[in-house]
Amino acid sequence: KLVALNCVNFEFEACDFAEKNMNTVDKRDGKSKEGCGRVSINRLTKLVNSYTLECHYHTGAKINKLGLRRDLSGNFYPNDPINDTNDPFYNRGPPVYTRAIYDDVGKGLAIALLDFCDKNPRSRLVNTDYNSITGLRNYLRMFCGGSNSNSGNG
């Protein structure tokens, strides 16, 4: 969820680590998810809370609207051009992925780690409904409340 709050092109809703999902077959190409990174790592290591970052090779299904970053003094900072959904680049919806988008997903992951450790001097969290890492953790506890401990959703 933190990566989605910091990256226009990361789809939190598409993250599904439930056992049922690991065994499904894609209706489009008939291939199972058994060979994808997240399933393989889980099967090999039996680690419940380990994740792989996988990126679709062409385009996503949606784009996120990002809040502005705010520092500890209350100053706001504009989004980078790649994260500005008002840019003509995003006029037709999710774009075909470019090197800049893949780079931005990596940057979003790094920023998410700063938020997770509560060490981000220019966090977007303060401009969300969660307001802080504690608020986001509370949301995720509720979000995951109905799932079993092996699903890893969220």
Image: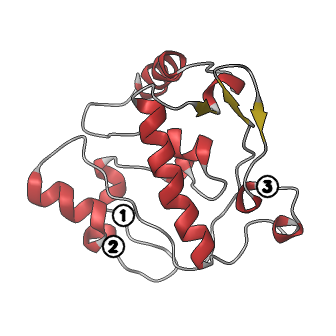
For disc 3, the marked residue is 84
Give the class, few, some or many, for how many residues have Cα within 10 Å of label 2's Cα (few <14, many ≥20). Answer: some
Residue at 46 percent of width and 83 percent of height:
29
Q: Say if 112 sits above or below 92 in the image.
A: above
Mark nearer the viewer, 3 or 2: 3
Image coordinates of residue 78 in percent, x first then y, are: 79, 44
Give the structural element (helix, strand or loop) at label 1.
loop
Total marks shown come to: 3
The three-letter amino acid code for the residue at tag 3 is Asp
Residue drawn at 58 percent across, 46 percent down: 4
Q: Which of label 1 and label 3 is nearer to you?
A: 3
Q: Quadrant of the C terminus?
A: top left
Q: Secondary structure at mark 2?
A: loop
What's the mark number on residue 24? Answer: 1
Q: Earlier in the sequence, mark 1 or mark 3?
A: 1
Q: Which one is nearer the viewer's eye here, 139 or 18?
A: 139
- Side of 54 relative to 128 (left or right): left
In this picture, residue 68 sits left or right of residue 103: right
Image location of residue 2, percent across then percent down: 51, 38
Residues under numbered marks 1 and 2 in contact, where contact means CB atoms less than 8 Å apart: yes
Q: Amino acid at mark 2?
A: Ser
Q: Is residue 60 left or right of residue 68?
A: left
Residue marked by disc 2: 32
- The amino acid marked with disc number 1 is Thr
Q: Earlier in the sequence, mark 3 or mark 2?
A: 2
Q: Is residue 1 visible?
A: no
Q: How is the image coloured?
A: secondary structure
- Residue 138, position in %: x, y? 48, 16
> Marks 1/2: CA distance?
6 Å
Distance Cα–Cα, label 1 vs label 3: 35 Å
